[in-house]
Image: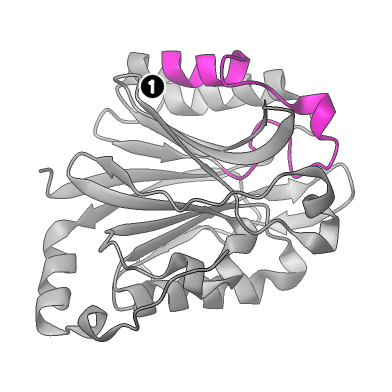
Amino acid sequence: MQQTLNIALVQADLFWEDPEKNRLHFTKIIDDLDSTVDVVVLPEMFTSGFTMQAKAVAETMQGNTVSWMLALASKTNIAIAGSVVIFENNNYYNRFLFVEPSGKTTYYNKRHTFTLAGEHNVYTAGKTKVIIAYKGWKICPLICYDLRFPVWARNVEYYDVLLYVANWPVNRIDAWDSLLKARAIENMSYCIGVNRVGVDGLGMAYCGSSSAYDVLGKKITEIPLNKAIHHVVTLHKTHIEKYRRTLRFLEDKDAFNLLK
């Protein structure tokens, strides 16, 4: 078990609906990361931006982006995470991919599709919560709109890290900040959110506000707004263990089953 986990939060602008340009851009960033980084996290739909033109940008699990992630993770010895548009079994998914240097690939399909933008009309919602086991850490991957639904994120698995990737617009950024902090506090886990910057092809503006919170809801990152930047945060197992041992809030959580 690894007692610390170094995660690089990549707050980036995205080339609209251009997977090749985005891959080239992120290759340079990931190649330059320090060898001590364990995981690099890219934004939601990092190859295209948050588009409803799924057919134009979708790939398969055997496509260029997954192949790129596998090759780069192996080369750098860093796990690569982020969501992309995947076509599978005649459905389009907003899929979170976690690709390890060993080649092991875990994925999560976004459960809460963003109805305000019509995402539910294009993408099939996921049905399964996923916990990733990596270097002795348990990571729960979620995507953007999932942040507004605390029941789905509830820490019944005793995960260590709640990890969100997003295209969360600037006009609702206060909600993003507040909800990330709340998810950390109520789940007694680290909570990390990686958001994009810039303006997308539909004119929607993003300011980033990527951040990490500890199990008490304390912000442990200082990342500039409106700036394309990567920031490495170090997570500590002893921090989680200390407060879960002394503040046994998770033991008092409600028991429930999701019906659908």
Q: Quadrant of the C terminus?
A: bottom right
In which quarter of the view is residue 60 placed?
A: top right
Task: Tell me the residue that label 1 is attached to.
Answer: 73
Question: Is any atom of residue 116 visible in this view?
Answer: yes
Q: Characterize the local packing of mark 1: few (<14), some (14-19) or many (20 or more) Cα atoms within 10 angstroms.
A: many
Residue drawn at (20%, 39%), measured in percent from left and top? 135
Towards the viewer: 85 or 92 = 92
Q: Secondary structure at mark 1?
A: helix
| Amino acid identity at mark 1 | Ala
- Magenta stretch, residue numbers: 43-71
Q: Does 104 appear in magenta? A: no
Q: Position of residue 128 (x, y in %)?
A: 49, 50
Q: Is residue 117 left or right of residue 129?
A: right
Q: Is residue 217 left or right of residue 252?
A: right
Residue drawn at (85%, 36%), measured in percent from left and top? 53
Towards the viewer: 77 or 256 = 256
In which quarter of the view is residue 123 placed?
A: top right
Q: Is residue 160 above or below residue 58?
A: below
Residue drawn at (55%, 58%), measured in percent from left and top? 224
Q: Is residue 236 left or right of residue 258?
A: left
Q: Quadrant of the N terminus?
A: top left
Q: Does 45 appear in magenta? A: yes
Q: Is residue 73 left or right of residue 48?
A: left
Q: Is residue 260 above or below residue 19?
A: below
Q: Position of residue 74 (x, y in %)?
A: 34, 16
Q: Position of residue 247 (x, y in %)?
A: 17, 84
In which quarter of the view is residue 101 placed?
A: top left
In the displayed orientation, state which residue is furthest to the right: 202
Residue drawn at (12%, 67%), measured in percent from left and top? 241
In the displayed orientation, state which residue is furthest to the front: 259
